[in-house]
Amino acid sequence: MINLLFIAADTSNSLDKNFYFLEKELAKLTNLTIWRKSGRIDNILNKITTKPDYILLLNDIGSQMFPIIKGLFSINIPIGLIVNDVHRFTESRRHYIRKNNIQHIFSIVRDKFHEIYPEYKSKMEWFPHFVNTKVCKDYGLKKDINLLMIGAVNNFYPVRQKILQAYKEDPEFIYHHHPGYRNFKKDEENQIYIDEKYAKEINRSKIFFTCPSILNYPVKKYFQVLACKSLLLAPTFKELEDLGFIPDNHFISINEYNFKEKATYYLANETERKKIIEEGYRFIHYTHSIKIRAQQLVNKIENTLS
């Protein structure tokens, strides 16, 4: 096993716990040390008990870049930077990568990274979203929600805006607002659609709508909805299909003009709906689980070291 130092904020109580779950998987595959604070890398290395073979850094989860590790250019340990939100902190990140001579970049999205950072294209490894299949799964719940949408609706998500406007008076349609990116207390988690409560709500739905934003991101909902056994209606695009998502096999491709027609059709045709749901469910659980993605990440790091 390699000695891995993972430097990242604690996301165990946040809306998006994916990287907290990733830490748990990495602990099974590596000799993992976790560091949470900003500081100089030489001071950090003096404080931890195991010298790392590789340093993995994640610092773009919150409202500002954190933790910030200084002096990385002065050590001879390979460093990888995970880029979660490629469209934020663009110039700060560019400066950070250049100043610290970071050689490996693991980006959640591919095409937008290439567009924003063409000079780092050769350093980038695609590290797409993943799901914790212990949370995003089939709970066997009664399908008592016909049409569901959860999440932000604003100019960043124009197709979601069209869908909400079209169905706002329809009793078959349920919409839950985005709870905001922040840390949540345990008692709040029972009241807000996050984690298991979020997954169970999707599992109750026959059809779930989303869209990839104006940036054409394969947002996590593409993965989560299929993993929770609902029929996803959402736009398709090249980056999504390059991840293995097949329109009309794993999900139903829509645009701002035909979503209502397609929703009506698949609500009425249960056999077709269930067949696509099953295909999508198997696809995510066998291809994009956190267990698979963590192993892929470790394999890439080991290849770098070898």
Image (cartoon, rainbow, N blue to C red):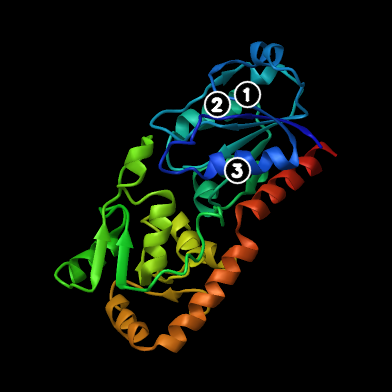
Residue 17: give x, y in percent of width and height.
Answer: 49, 43
Residue 71: give x, y in percent of width and height.
Answer: 63, 16
Q: CA distance from mark 2 to mark 3?
A: 24 Å
Marked residue nearer the N-terminal end (3 or 1):
3
Q: CA distance from mark 2 to mark 1?
A: 6 Å
Q: Is residue 116 above or below residue 235?
A: above
Number of residue marks: 3
Residue 214: give x, y in percent of width and height.
Answer: 36, 56
Kind of residue indicated by mark 1: Asn
Secondary structure, mark 1, is: helix
Q: Are marks 3 and 1 in contact (CB under 8 Å)?
A: no
- The answer to which of 189 and 33 lies nearer the viewer is 189
Task: State the residue position of label 2.
Answer: 96
Identified at 53% across, 22% down, the residue is 68
Residue 137: give x, y in percent of width and height.
Answer: 51, 62
- The answer to which of 198 and 95 lies nearer the viewer is 198
Q: Nearer the viewer, mark 3 or mark 1?
A: 3
Identified at 25% across, 61% down, the residue is 175
Secondary structure, mark 2, is: helix
Q: Are marks 2 and 3 in contact (CB under 8 Å)?
A: no
Identified at 30% across, 71% down, the residue is 147
Task: State the residue position of label 1.
Answer: 100
Kind of residue indicated by mark 2: Tyr
Please identify the quadrant where the N terminus is shown. Answer: top right
Task: State the residue position of label 3.
Answer: 22
Q: CA distance from mark 3 to mark 1?
A: 25 Å
Q: Are marks 2 and 1 in contact (CB under 8 Å)?
A: yes
Identified at 33% across, 88% down, the residue is 268
